[in-house]
Amino acid sequence: MVLKNILQDEDIALLQDYRNRTDKKELKISSIKQFIANYNILSKIINEDDWIKDYDKVMNTIDNSGKGNSTQRNYLNCIIQWCQVDGIDKDIVNKYIHERDKRNNIYNENMATNKLSDEDIIITKEELITMFNKLDKLLKLKDIYKKNWSIMDNNDKDLYTFYVMMNLYMEHPLRNDYGSMLILQKKEYSLLKDEDKAGKNYLLRYNNTYSMAIGDYKTNKHNETAVIDIVDKPLSQVIRKYLKIKGNSGYLFEIKGQPIAKNQLTKFLQKYNKEYLGKAVSTRSIRKSFYTELNKDGDVDVNELSKIAKNNLHSVGIAIDIYTKDTT
């Protein structure tokens, strides 16, 4: 038995070593950390030694977890990885693979028919303008634009964070890639070693302009960094004002002094969108709404869409087939 009941970051080496020995594709550190997190979630629920070998108990736990198909699929992907590391009997591993593949088929079918979760919550440009105007008035009423970040209470910080975050998502609807994003001068970023850039996301500032260097994103197949220029002037003004108050270094978005992690980000948005927009809008809903608005007349230029999709870190096919809701 190689695995402990609770894994730590230092156990990343176990999975890396296994994949190196078996000539499997190298995984990103962020992916391995997610495998560790999911393993620990299941381990705490089942609370038994060698639980990963007990196929029936594991499947009963997953089936009754109340989680959706995608989360169950992620749990099984995690289990398969750690079973292989631990040399668990192949018959057990194959059972897990069979269950994972069943959920993969459901996922792929949903993707193909444009039926992924969030019940297709769509927000319009008019709704957003109304919300931004309301938030701007509220921020002014609270004198937040004139306050010092260090003495601002957490509620006001969260409100301002939400306002800036939604402004970013309206122009650049990435997935959860703003989670744990760092702020850095462009010149300082250029001096970083490759290993300090890899697997991290940065907001880069140069004079009064901004760009993003995204090294940790879902579709990154070759450990490349995508650079996205922020060209929208009103958005640049929102960012400039925010950084003047919050500071020009550290993490872009925080909750109670801690960086907002990727898995926190969509919940944060849902909470505040529910309060100020009247809809629990997630990052996926934002992306869907973005492309639905872009293609609302059905005549979007494919070349333009291709450029926009590239900046949003996916293919034009994904933009059309997945993120554009059929409103007919």
Image (spheres, rainbow, N blue to C red):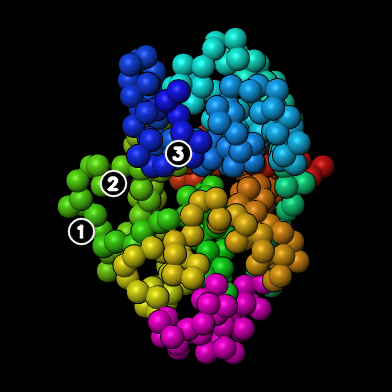
Across and down, in percent, residue 253 comes to: 46, 64
Q: Quadrant of residue 275?
A: bottom right
What distance separates the C-alpha of mark 1 from that of mark 3? Answer: 38 Å
Asked if residue 166 lies in the magenta stretch, the reply is: no
Across and down, in percent, residue 28 comes to: 39, 35
- Tell me what residue is drawn at x 56 percent, y 55 percent: 264
- Tell me what residue is drawn at x 63 percent, y 30 percent: 73
Residue underneath mark 1: 187
Tell me the amino acid under the disc marked 1.
Lys
What distance separates the C-alpha of mark 1 from that of mark 2? Answer: 13 Å
What are the residue bounds of the magenta stretch? 131-158
Tell me the amino acid under the disc marked 2.
Lys
- Tell me what residue is drawn at x 51 percent, y 82 percent: 153
From this viewpoint, which residue is outermost toward the right? 328
From this viewpoint, which residue is outermost toward the front? 49
Query: Is residue 176 visible from the viewing direction of this image?
Result: yes
Query: Between tags 1 and 3, which lies in front?
Result: 3
What distance separates the C-alpha of mark 2 from that of mark 3? Answer: 26 Å
Across and down, in percent, residue 114 comes to: 72, 35
From this viewpoint, which residue is outermost toward the left? 191
Tell me the number on the disc at residue 7.
3
